[in-house]
Amino acid sequence: MVRHLLGLLAGVAVTPLLWVGVAWAGDQIARHAAGQESSVPLPTACAVLMGVGLLGAVLAATRFSPLAAFVSGGVLLGGPLWALLDPGSLTQLLPAWLVGSDSLVHPLGPGLPLLCTLGTLLFLSALVPSRWRSRSQPWSEEVYPPLPPPAREHGPTPTPPPPADPPPASDQADDLATRTTLPFRRGEDGIHPLAGDDDHHTRVFGDGR
């Protein structure tokens, strides 16, 4: 709330400076463009106009308070528009020294095109929603809230069992021997495995002799 109050005061204080600077620099540049005599060099008028643009850029880009740009842009844009749409009602409210045709700061004076340009820029820059948020609350955290942490399972995490050790080489040899297919012999009463002392004989498949 305090920053917006300070922004309102800054906008009220800066608006007359912007208006007078734009009107004076625009009048001097118009005189040089028309070939009229002027006591002010053209570079000086351009430097003043650049200073006005720098001040307007600070009001349009700062995150302190957009209310300063809102007030300045509203006045700089609203004055010329009022004078264009209803000049009679505006003339009744302005003082006599400001209504004259030779008035430098009249809304329809030499600063009219620059007032409309700068006023539109400041007023639209104050309408950006992110500028009205507090600096302690970033825009990304509000639009995209942080994801909740993943839910943890109850109880301790089970530990995987250690890998089994390979069997000894001797056990592997015994297992290979037991899985070896035994030779068979065909006889009259069926097929019988060879065993005992007949292993050294050569077996011939035939009529069982």
Image: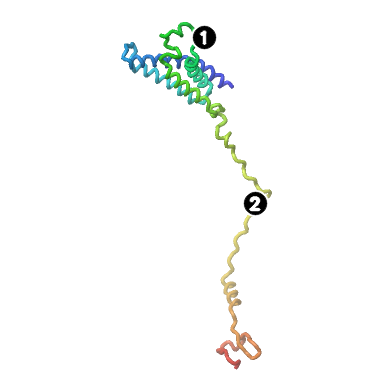
**Image quarter for residue 17?**
top left
The residue that appears at 49% across and 20% down in the rendered structure is 73
Q: Which mark is residue 72?
A: none
The quadrant of the image that shows the C terminus is bottom right
Q: Position of residue 205 (x, y in %)?
A: 57, 89
Amino acid beneath label 2: Thr
Report how far apart the C-alphas of labels 2 and 1 lie in the structure. Answer: 81 Å
Q: Position of residue 10 (x, y in %)?
A: 51, 18
Amino acid beneath label 1: Leu
Looking at the image, is 181 positioned above or below residue 209?
above
Q: Are marks 2 and 1 in contact (CB under 8 Å)?
A: no
- Element marked by disc 1: helix
In the image, which is nearer the foreground, mark 2 or mark 1?
A: 1
Q: Nearer the viewer, residue 134 or 164?
A: 134
**Image quarter for residue 139?**
top right
Tell me which label, 2 or 1, sits earlier in the chain: 1
Say few, some or many: other residues with alpha carbon within 10 Å of mark 2 (under 14 / 14 to 19 / 20 or more). few
Q: Which mark is residue 93?
A: 1
Q: Is residue 61 left or right of residue 152?
A: left
Q: Position of residue 32 (x, y in %)?
A: 33, 15
The residue that appears at 58% across and 69% down in the rendered structure is 168
Q: Which residue is mark 2?
A: 157
* Colour scheme in use: rainbow
